[in-house]
Image (cartoon, rainbow, N blue to C red):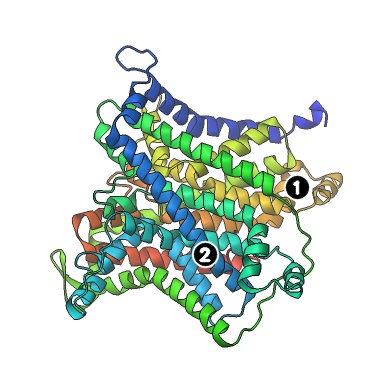
Amino acid sequence: MNRKAKLDIWTPVTLGLVGLYGIFLVYPLVNLLAQALIDKETGRLTLAYFIKFFSTPYYFNTLLNSFKVVAVVTVLTIIVATPLAYIFSRYKIKGKGILRVLIILSSMSAPFIGAYSWILLLGRSGVITLFFKNSLGIAIPNIYGFSGILLVLTLQLYPLIFLYVSGALKNVDNSLLEASENLGCSGIRRFFIIVIPLIAPTLLAGGLLVFMRALADFGTPMLIGEGYRTFPVTIFNEFISEIGGDDGFASAISIVAIIITSLVFLIQRYIATRKSFTMNLLNKIRPEETTGIKRILIHVYSYALVGISIMPQVYIIFTSFKNTKGLTFAPGYSFQNYFAAFDKVGKAITNTITIPAISLVFIVFLAVLLAYITVRRPGPVSSALDSISMVPYIIPGSVVGIALLIAFNKPPLILSGSMVIMVVGLVIRRLPYTIRSSVAILQQISLDIEDAALSLGSSKMNTFYKITMPMMAAGIISGGILSWITMISELSTAILLYTARTRTLTVEIYTQIIRGNYGVAAALSSMLAVLTVISLLIFNVVSKEGDLSM
């Protein structure tokens, strides 16, 4: 392509996107690095903050604790979810559609809400704990500490592996499974010898997402970790304590988080690339009927796992209708908690719809432009844009919040304390979801269609808006809804950026839990669950497949 062809209407669009990312992502991250490396008193380069972190057991041990948590959680989610996805793809299960919705719902709420639910169930005064103690005389372990964090995060994140593996199994040719069965390899042996190697790249991708989500979550260990300190909690606490003073140490810890997640991401990409392969799908896997003990086992496994994972959500909804007296629950049921929720924090409910809605408009607009530039105008600049857009995907949300606050808390651009910084944070964090879905569907649209429109006299922008975008609609809407669902349950970034005027439901739920107002917290959590369910139903309507996979 010659230079003249390159300099068209898309050139200023590309430059505009480069400018936006430069201002709202690159500049904050570079500024974060500068805060960590430059001594404020002398103005010289220093590694003092990093030395402090790695030489102080209190801080360094939190990093080791987090690695222990995320490593075990990643393995557990793969062990739990991979057989479930295989069972769903391979066999007919009664109520499979409902089970799939429940699986997705259990993953879409903020992890700390799951932690709060399990406190009500397995806390020192939890329903299950007291039942075993008073009725059976058995003292069961409570939810607090390392094991509790593992339980909450595993049940919260295994659906991600389930969705990834479900998507991968759609592309596995059933002829391979039939051939292996004819050669005497069937059942569990076939699962490990044939299926696992075929979906290995997908397991790596899903494992990466679980790793990132588990490492970034601070709400769960904050609520139930007690003495078990983790890295995200340290980042949050150190930054909060540094406000109004020297924020260099908080910046240094954030840089350590970025380096760790980036290294893990690069290693995963390298391994996945070496293991990648293509497969011609001629005979799609179709669910088959089972009988006898096999039928019983797959149903028991499916229903038991889904039932345990959705139990906290169900119990929260049940709890939201219990009467409260002060900070404790009282006999009887009513809408008291909902009235109190609307009375105390009605603004948070409005913000949870308004702020993500505004953010979603920008996400869809930017994602479509970025997807088009990435697919239709490949080159160094578009490749750089595509790579930069994925940066927020691999770094903790709390780090994004810290970077934005430090960068935009002083001239020339002061955004802290405004709704704008909340929108910017959500857009940056959740834009990758819609970009990826938009890129995926655009790659399936033939360029010949656009060329035909151009040859008939249509301008490039007219072709884009009237031809290309309508054909991308399914991917745009699907990605947009996924971005929306993750935005309404966002906590790690919002907890740092909010003010009294921009509180959201997740922030308010977290605040009410900390204050001990469990009834109001349960009501707000139920409202968030309803919003999530409605969003998922809309997704099912617009989704081509009628179900969610990755």
Question: Tag on residue 527?
Answer: none
Q: Nearer the viewer, residue 420 or 55?
A: 55
Q: Is residue 33 above or below residue 69?
A: above
Number of the front mark, 2 or 1: 2
> How far apart, in angstroms, are the residues tagged by discs 2 and 1?
43 Å
What amino acid is labelled 2 in the image? Ala
Q: Is residue 445 above or below residue 420?
A: below
Q: Nearer the viewer, residue 420 or 237?
A: 237
Q: Is residue 259 left or right of residue 201?
A: left
State the quadrant of the N terminus: top right
Q: Nearer the viewer, residue 491 or 267?
A: 267
Residue 155 position within the rendered picture, expressed as x and y whole percent measured from the top left: 42, 63
Q: Which residue is mark 1?
A: 463
Residue 98 position within the rendered picture, expressed as x and y whole percent measured from the top left: 51, 76
Residue 304 position within the rendered picture, expressed as x and y whole percent measured from the top left: 44, 75
State the quadrant of the C terminus: bottom right
Q: Residue at x 37, y 40 (%)?
A: 63
Q: Residue 119: in sight, yes or no? A: yes
Q: Is residue 9 left or right of residue 126?
A: right
Q: Secondary structure at mark 2?
A: helix
Q: Residue furthest bottom?
A: 292
Q: Secondary structure at mark 1?
A: helix
Residue 4 position within the rendered picture, expressed as x and y whole percent measured from the top left: 80, 28
Q: Residue at x 32, y 39 (%)?
A: 61
Q: Residue 390: in sight, yes or no? A: no
Q: Is residue 488 left or right of residue 384?
A: left
Q: Which residue is mark 2?
A: 81
Q: Residue at x 68, y 48 (%)?
A: 275
- Quadrant in which residue 505 is drawn: bottom left
What amino acid is labelled 1 in the image? Thr
Q: Does the CB distance between marks 2 and 1 fall below 8 Å? A: no
Q: Residue furthest front?
A: 184
